[in-house]
Image (tube, rainbow, N blue to C red):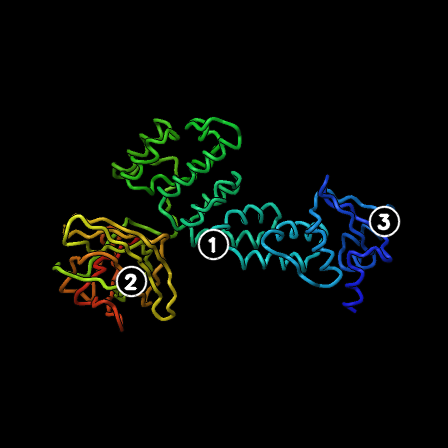
Amino acid sequence: MRERIVFLFNNEILSDVTFLVGRGAQQQRIPAHKLVLSSGSAVFDAMFNGTLATASSEIEVPDVEPAAFLAVLLFLYTDEIQIDPETVMTTLYTAKKYAVSALEKHCVDFLKNNLTSDNAFLLLTQARLFDEPQLASVCLDTIDRFTTQALNADGFTDIDIDTLMIVLERDTLRVRESKLFQAVLRWSEAECVRQQLSVTPENQRLVLGNALSLVRFPLMSKEEFTAGPAQSGLLNYSEVLSLFSYFILNPKPSVGFQTMPRCCMTGKEQTVCRFQHTKSRWGYFGTSDRIRFSVDRRIFLIGYGVYGSTQEPAIYEVSVELIHTASGKVIATNATSFSCDGSKYTYRLMFKELAEILPNTIYTASATFKGPCSYYGTKGLRTVLVDCDSGNTKVKFEFSSELGDNNGTSTDEGQIPELIFYT
């Protein structure tokens, strides 16, 4: 049966209707058969057999691309799915237009399976345009989990103001508020260009409208606010003054911006150090330094503190990873570099995004160094308690040695002396 019906697809033999699909030079004449279309689409059934059925043998469809229309017809004739990254959105639009729900579901599944942090904002905009709440929810979840990467993607600055506000309202973004403000600045610059306005602080605030009030300036440190928003020109004198008062005074005065932490984080950035002394020298031969750890309550890890060179000046190239030990899955990563001045101080290496650390779960902190010999820690602590929330609660860190080749790092001595986190 399928082979016999396939013969009729896009074939004028016994065709009783013709569609003029597309516009201008791209328009195509596509023959079809009312029986096949009516049996697979309620819209086509109403078009040909309803009380307001058309009597015309030619039907214009200017709002649909020919390739997408053919993909829908192919599915109605054969159940065959013909979609790819270039045509999936236009096919989804056409499937919704003609109520071909099975093909619509295939398009949405295809988008979900190909969703990444790089295209999450683009697909979120399309999902809202096509009224696909399930796809929109998956896009937002991806943006929550990979906020930094999604904000840095090219598609972020192309979203509309309503989509921007939906994202800024979320409590589950995993990003520092200062980084979020920088992304909002980039979006406002792009929007000024789209509206053919000069890129000035006044026009940037104009195009942002109420979206600016959704940036949670009180979540920034005083230093972050001073270096960024306070000098941007987007905030007026009264807003800047009230926010500086918020950073300085206790009890905190009320401000016109939300103070609820995002991503369920509370408190300030903190560091746990597992060594009591520092020595030199620690060599690197391409093997990763690794240490295992667990905590007794949920935290959000943002990076490591590491030792630098005993010589000055020196530059290291480092790949840092956070690994779920039982599964071997890499949860957070970054390839970066840092320069040293020969001091015994530690140097901060940040992940690309926050990593949620669950209680009573073993993780492996890993760092692969390329550079000269460095300092290293000694007299390591297996258990460290860190005060949180003004000393009312504590986080308990348990450290253990990684089995196998770990460049010598253990609970007693080695690299990765610090974990940097939020509660």
Q: Which residue is mark 3?
A: 51
How dense is the environment of label 3, judged by Cα within 10 Å: few (below 14), some, or many (20 and up)? few
Relative image position of residue 141 (x, y in whole percent): 48, 54
Q: In the picture provided, is 234 more to the left or to the right than 91? A: left
* In this rendering, the label closer to the viewer, 3 or 1: 1
Q: Quadrant of the C terminus?
A: bottom left
Q: Residues within 10 Å of mark 1 (few under 14, many from 20)?
A: many
Mark 1 lies on residue: 142
Q: Amino acid at mark 3?
A: Thr
Residue at left 31%, top 56%?
A: 301
User: What kind of element bears circle 3?
Assistant: loop
Residue at disc 2, secondary structure: strand
Marks counted in the figure total 3
Residue 408, given in percent of the width and then of the height, sits at 20, 68
Q: CA distance from mark 2 to mark 3?
A: 69 Å
Proximity of marks 1 and 2: CB atoms separated by less than 8 Å: no
**Where is mark 2, residue-wise?**
366
Tell me if 422 is positioned left or right of 278 in this view.
right
Of tags 2 and 3, which is closer to the observer? 2
- Which amino acid type is shown beneath numbered disc 2? Ser
Q: CA distance from mark 1 to mark 2?
A: 25 Å
Looking at the image, tell me whether mark 3 or mark 1 is earlier in sequence order.
3
Q: Residue furthest bottom?
A: 404
Nearer to us in this view, 106 or 316? 316
Dot 1 or dot 2: first in sequence order is 1
Q: Position of residue 378 (x, y in %)?
A: 14, 63
Decide: is 292 above or below 197: below
